[in-house]
Amino acid sequence: MSRKLLLLTTALAASAAFPANAGQVFNRIAIFPVATNLPADVDAATPTSSEIIATTEDGMTLVYSDSPLGAVGFIDITDPKAPKAGGIVKIDGEPTSVAVANKKVLTGINTSKSKQEPSGNLTVIDLASKAIEASCDLGGQPDSVTLSADGMFLAIAIENERDEELNDGALPQMPAGNLKIVALTDGVPDCASIKTVDLTGIATVAPEDPEPEFVAFNEAGQIAVTLQENNHVAIVDAATAKIVSHFSAGDVTLENVDTKKDGALSFTGKIENAPREPDAVKWLDNDRLVVANEGDYKGGARGLTIFSKAGEELYESGPSFEYQAAAAGHYSDARNKKGVEPEGLEFASFGDQKLIFVAAERASLIGVYKDTGAEPEFLQLLPSGIGPEGLVAIPQRNLLVTANETDLVEDGLARSHVMVYELGEGQAAYPQITSSFKDDGTPLGWGALSGLVADPKEAGKLYAVSDSVYRSAPAIFTIDATKTPALITEKIIVTRDGQPAQKLDLEGIVADGKGGFWLASEGRSDKLVPHAIYNVNAKGEIKEEIAFPAELLTHETRYGLEGITTLGEGDDLTLVMAIQREWADDPKGQVKLLAYKPKDKEWSAVRYPLDAAEKGWVGLSEISAQDGKLYIIERDNLIAQEARNKRVYAVALDGFKPSKLGGELPLVEKTLVRDLLPDLKSATNGYVVDKVEGFAVDAAGEAFVVTDNDGVDDSSGETLFLRLGNIATIN
């Protein structure tokens, strides 16, 4: 990418981020857990996935491929705000992709014995009866399938994918893949008509092993097929099955990108000459096509590129798309080779707007762009489930649907979900909190907000901390909550002796009355992270460290401090902290609220009664003093439909009388202030997220809640910033 283009995309990222969104925007209106489609006689904990998704011609039924289950699933969206399970069709093999032609579902099925012995077929399912009617042998492992605009042809990418464990995944790995073109009559394929397009010999990376990935038709009956590992695109005429042109997808040099998996978001690195290695492709018209540059071999340019069908580069996004993701807290530090991994694409006209939708697998986001005929205009981000793969637009109903393939049921985390969005008047519901951009156009980079506190004097000004996800750059964030979305305006790295402080897991923050903060760090002795309280100045420099006393550490368990607040001031200052779960000396169902007086260096505590857990565990995640009460967030560790307890409780200060450690500790009484489950469900019409971790009341009495997105690690990455209203009226 030229220096001029780099500066352009960087400037666009800074200037176009999160527009006011007046007029029409997409908002999520419903979600569908794919496991809902499991038959009654199948264990509900069986892993499922929604990978590639299609719709019937009337837009009322969704059809998706479920590879781990070996099935094709159906969802009734007659009422798009209330999707209904439509059942599944079990298939002998692994469905890889689906298309709907007339009244038939056409799905590519992988039946390979191994990567070295690929095989597969095209299976035909009748929409009305859900019966498997026929199949065509494909002679290899199918990946993407797509239908021509006139319904006369189906294109199938026969990938014969490489084995990444064999010779470190190096190409070539035979047998070679190819492109199949099948003639259709009323949606029924004519197996005898199948034509094979040889794609070998046209690319330069491994010409004998093309590895076709994704296919798309234009209105003229031409097929674009990406050869991802070969970093190449071929254009094929469907009627003649001839290659009419082909070109290299080229490479990009990226500056100011995060390149290290080091527990810090630092957009200062450089990647030189990265092959784009496109995954999905969509035609914008008969002469232009857009590709998502995921990379699956040695490259991945992290963005999207528009080419002419002759191979001329018309637009390159550079890092601008992932800048948008990072500003929304959706940049994962866990895998930086390919950044946010743009993978899926959709293109459709909604009224007079031609829209491009790009799915970022690693960021769990959908980017929405307007095709202008030249430089696409960034419009908004949509929150998706984990690992969005397939997208389908239903413009006649003003709908967009995403299929999110990742199912973490075995870890007790989020399931695979299909999500429905509607275009309508109003404001974008997401993101609810974003960051500003630096002077050089790069994002601040943030995530995993684990503690929240209000400025003592300025209404609408808050501070938050990030937890151990960012172990190399623990930070304090300044938030302007007077803006919508709330805006992170400053990021201060917590330092020790001039260097970013190590061995911290910041879970709580409170102003110290001197321009600095008290920070609570959750310890883990097995990882040499101490349980401690830190006092930092306005620059984030650690000035004092207060370790736990032996009386506490003798009984420590895995879960430590989760919030800090203050009572009194001067010589009477008392720090009050919440321990998340029971320690060894706590009765079952009770946890400690600790108190520490810095002047006297005295520790004391009370016990707090936890709600009983129906499933999983229940613990504390925040504490905040306000108007004679301690406000405490109590939550379970459950997600989506399983979530039961996300609540704000209050403990009256006149009943908070801590006793010295080592003796009997008094048990406080709590009063329910707010059940947060309705707020979490309605915030963006998504599933309930796990970690409700921050609560604060500002100088005007307004109450705020923030969730921890785990740094987009095994998480949808969604951060919810809830505005509960005045503290006097929230219950």
Image (cartoon, rainbow, N blue to C red):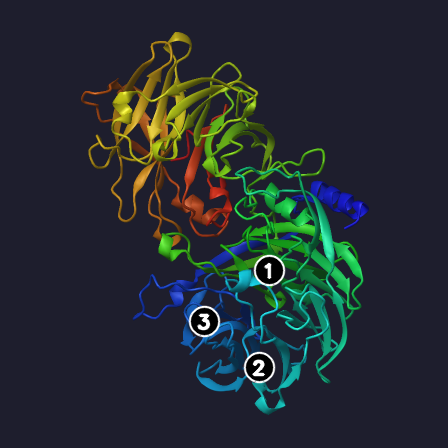
Disc 2 from disc 1: Cα separation: 34 Å
Measuring from the top left, give residue 183's x and y in whole percent.
63, 86
Q: Is residue 58 visible?
A: yes
Which residue is identified by label 1?
296
Q: Nearer the viewer, residue 11 or 18?
A: 11
Mark 1, residues whose alpha carbon is within 10 Å: few (<14), some, or many (≥20)?
Answer: some
2 or 1: tag closer to the N-terminus: 2
Residue 576 is left or right of residue 664, and the answer is right
Q: Is residue 196 above or below residue 702?
A: below
Q: Secondary structure at mark 1?
A: loop
Residue 152 shows in the view: no
What's the amino acid at mark 1? Answer: Asp
What residue does disc 3 label?
73
Looking at the image, residue 125 lies above or below residue 27:
below
Residue, disc 2: 102
Neighbor class of circle 2 (other Cα within 10 Å; few <14, some 14-19, many 20+) is some
Residue 452, image x, y percentages: 47, 30
Q: In the image shown, does 59 or 495 lie closer to the viewer?
A: 495
Q: Are marks 2 and 1 in contact (CB under 8 Å)?
A: no
Question: In the rendered structure, which disc, 2 or 3, sits on the residue that comes first in sequence?
Answer: 3
Q: Amino acid at mark 3?
A: Gly
Q: Position of residue 369 (x, y in %)?
A: 68, 55
Quote the CA–CA distance across marks 2 and 3.
17 Å
What residue is at 34 percent from the left and 61 percent from the top? 45
- Secondary structure of residue under mark 3: strand
Q: Nearer the viewer, residue 167 or 403?
A: 167
Q: For the residue carrying disc 3, how many other residues have a C-alpha within 10 Å: few (<14), some (14-19), or many (20+)? A: many
261 or 656: nearer the eye?
261
